[in-house]
Amino acid sequence: MSTSSPAATTPFPTPTLYAAERGLTLENVALADIATDFGTPTYVYSRAALTAAFESWRNALGGRGLVCYAVKANSNLGILSVFARLGAGFDIVSGGELARVLAAGGDAGKVVFSGVGKSRDEMRQALEAGIRCFNIESAAELDRLDAVAGELGRKAPIALRVNPDVDPKTHPYISTGLKSNKFGVAFGEALALYRRAASLPNLKVSGIACHIGSQLLDPAPVAEAAAKVLELVDQLAADGITLEHIDLGGGLGIRYRDETPPSVAEYLAPLLKVFEGRNEELCFEPGRSLVGNAGLLLTRVEYLKHGEEKNFAIVDAAMNDLARPALYDAYHEAVAVTPAGVAAQCYEIVGPICESGDFLAHDRQLALREGDLVALLSAGAYGMTMSSNYNTRPRAAEVIVDGDRVLLVRERETVAALYAGERRIDD
Ligand SMILES: *Cc1c(COP(=O)(O)O)cnc(C)c1O
């Protein structure tokens, strides 16, 4: 029977409950069974949670705009195909991500291409696929795209990514809308750049874009940015440049620990107010809020090490699998998967990598024995996509739980595959 519900005390919003004999479950599947069948470490996602997150965006928008999932948050084909089937668009930042979207059955006509460093090859690839819009971040990029489109005999749809210079009040590494960072074009330069874009023969001025940061917990800065963008749109119209769509980026935060992010509807309400009575199509690029709380990282305790000052739970996942704690000092809830029947102690949860920065969680009160499973929650976004092979560690398997089913959407890497492209020197 259900002894306690971590869902009540942790941020994980999906149906995650302790059943007395089965331990922690996701949808109708026991995480312990997933570990037995697929090994550890394994990323586990809930299709119901992915779908619910997408629907909450779509419902809150009420047909007023397009949701373009930011692929960099989690680019597994299984995840992309779930969103593609729901009718999502996609926000990409590389040709590689475009290839993934197409392989997953995504619609190129709903793809927006962001990023400051698009190569000629990537531009060609996106033009040939027929994407919906290039979000342009500099004058040089505008000229390059015009040239590439001309060579292909196509017209490239563009938006300028403008930098509204508002403070999103988030972590400095993930704030992107301030004047001092590399993203977007300054407001003061936008009018001149739009004029230039309109004069180039192989471009079609289509919209405007902004993205001010990530893990936003307050809707006010985005609404402020939107109001600034709208002023610019009206200035452009007075100048004879009319825009069809306004892309307000991603950034809605999620609960990792005790944050209280707005719901999608609460986040969008002040924004939609700004656009009341307007005809432009709206577009959003949520990443984290669609996948973050739909996934967890399942790992097994290799050793317990009880020291004088600290206790360590050395698990088989590491910073190469989940980099956010080492990189941003990010917090992920850690939950024991099966009730251990031993006393809880305070643990540092660390991986096997030879770096003292290799930790997954600090100071967690957990009842653990060697061989037990731990779930690191809220790991669906920027988990697998930021993983590496440091220490020649094959990357984790990924599965999607769908009701009673567990679908393997990425096989665990083999060591041989890691160096398959490398060559010895024998002379
Ligand atoms: C990273 C990024 C997103 C997604 O951000 P989230 O915080 O994951 O919602 C959207 N648009 C652009 C341009 C980005 O760089």
Image (cartoon, rainbow, N blue to C red):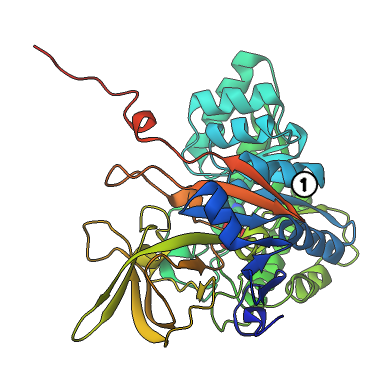
- Which residue occupies 54% across, 80% down? 257
Q: Outermost residue, top direction?
A: 427
| SS assignment at label 1 | loop
Question: Residue at coordinates 53% horizontally, 78% vertically from top-left?
Answer: 339
- Up the image or down, 278 lies above or below 398; here it is below
Q: Quadrant of residue 349?
A: bottom left
Q: In terms of depth relative to the viewer, which is nearer, 425 or 35?
A: 35
Q: Quadrant of residue 381?
A: bottom right
Q: Relative to residue 155, is residue 116 drawn left or right? A: left
Q: Amino acid at mark 1?
A: Ala
> Where residue 214 appears, x then y in whole percent?
55, 65
Left-right relation of 324 to 397: left
Quarter in which the N terminus is drawn: bottom right
> Is 425 positioned to the left or the right of 415 in the image?
left
Q: Quadrant of residue 110?
A: top right
Residue 266, position as x, y percentages in the image: 76, 77
| Residue drawn where x is 48% and y is 35% of the image | 140
- At which x and y percent is residue 177? 53, 63
Q: Position of residue 365 (x, y in %)?
A: 42, 85
Which residue is found at the position 56% from the left and 84% from the top?
258
Image quadrant for the C terminus? top left
**69 lies above or below 307:** above
Mark 1 vs ligand 1: CB below 8 Å: no
Residue 201 shows in this picture: no
For ligand 1, give the image quadrant: bottom right
- Label 1: few (<14), some (14–19) or many (≥20) C-alpha neighbours in 10 Å: many
Q: Which residue is mark 1?
A: 88
Q: Is residue 391 visible?
A: yes
Please name whichever residue, 122 or 1, is drawn nearer the observer in this view of the structure.
Answer: 1
